[in-house]
Image (spheres, rainbow, N blue to C red):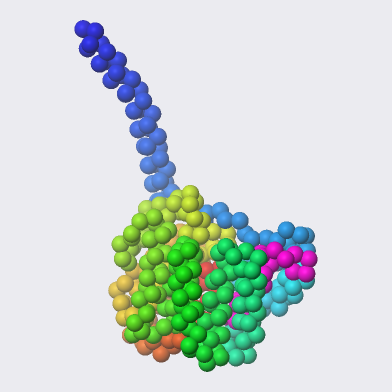
Amino acid sequence: MEINGSRARGLNNRGGVLMPVLLVFALAGLAFLFVAFVRPIKSVDLPIPLAASPNAKAATEHFWSVFHGDRYEEIPAVLDKLNKGYDGDKQPVMTNLLGAAHLWRFQERRRVGRTAPEMREDLVRAAAYADRTLAVDPNDTFAPAIRVTSRWQLAVLDGKPDELAAIELEILDNTQKYPQFHAFVQGWLLSAMLAPDSPRYGEAQAGFKLLADSCAGFTTPPNTRFNGLVFAYLAIKAWATVHLCYNNPVAPHNLESTFLSTGDMMVKMGQFDQARIWYGNAQASPTYATWRYRGVVEERLASDFKVLQTKYVADSGKLDVADPALSFQSTMGCANCHAQ
């Protein structure tokens, strides 16, 4: 009788512990479903880089206001303020934003009818500011992207194709160090600048795949269809680990931009069914309705993919091309990710 009584007490004790655990799991499950289907997470917190001293801080705040507002025409005023603030603040945040402003002005130059040769100096300055950042902080994660993007286009512009192999290796090295950011740069740049029949074009596809895997925390199925459950998982994972893996205050439409770029790459490769999946993923994003470039996805889906493919292939490696174009070569190259 005593043995039976001890067993009963043991079962009661385990039951007393198990019930709260089950309740926690049940509540967590309900919260996850609520986030997935009722009120999806639209952004995870990420501090916007601002300089420390008053003048420099005001200049960096102005940069982000203009950048997020997609006010390209105000870049000269932004550069003027950044340069004035830079005199009293040598922190990497200043050189990073000066580099970003010059790169932005070059990437979207066709908004004001300018050509790559006319804007060459912006690439030179962007690369130089990236080098200054890395000289102060070799572990900076943002400057390497400005550096390789600027240097690649300078090599094309200056007719120095022999330099591209070393820059490509630098891109791949950056990705290995910090895939949650540089894997996107790898896919974004190489998908536009390499021809799809190049033996190295797989590196573009590998970039976007590695981005998905590193953000998910496991090997993801190819051409995954995103839905509320997937977005909820990704948002919670990004909130707990790497905030760059989701929409955030620095890149408010990170998701849509990545999916659009992936879809365009698939069109260029002739994988039309896969392209539709990725364009559809952009449309499924919790912030798609507020994305100012959502019309681009809709135009893509309504287009003849064969015609688009021919255009994208012909544009390979070129700097001055007409829209529609892959994101890296287009007039919305930076804005489709960063504009609010």
Q: Nearer the viewer, residue 54 or 286?
A: 54
Q: Nearer the viewer, residue 204 or 230?
A: 204
Instruction: Count the numbered circles shown.
Output: 0
| Horizontal arrangement in the rendering, residue 90 relative to residue 207 (left or right) | right
**What is the chief secondary structure element of the magenta stretch?**
helix
Q: Is residue 287 magenta?
A: no
Residue drawn where x is 52% and y is 92% of the image: 159
Residue 30 appears at what percent x and percent y? 39, 41
| Horizontal arrangement in the rendering, residue 29 relative to residue 319 (left or right) | left
Residue 117 appears at what percent x and percent y? 60, 91
- Classify residue 269 by image quadrant: bottom left
Residue 155 seen in the current view: yes
Which quarter of the figure is the C terminus placed in? bottom right
Segment tinted magenta in the rendering? 86-108
Q: Is residue 89 magenta?
A: yes
| Horizontal arrangement in the rendering, residue 202 relative to residue 107 (left or right) | left
Residue drawn where x is 72% and y is 70% of the image: 82
Which quarter of the figure is the N terminus placed in? top left
- Classify residue 223 by image quadrant: bottom left
Residue drawn where x is 40% and y is 46% of the image: 32
| Horizontal arrangement in the rendering, residue 127 relative to residue 31 (left or right) | right
User: Compared with residue 188, is residue 242 higher up or lower down, i.e. above or below?
Assistant: above
Residue drawn where x is 31% and y is 81% of the image: 270
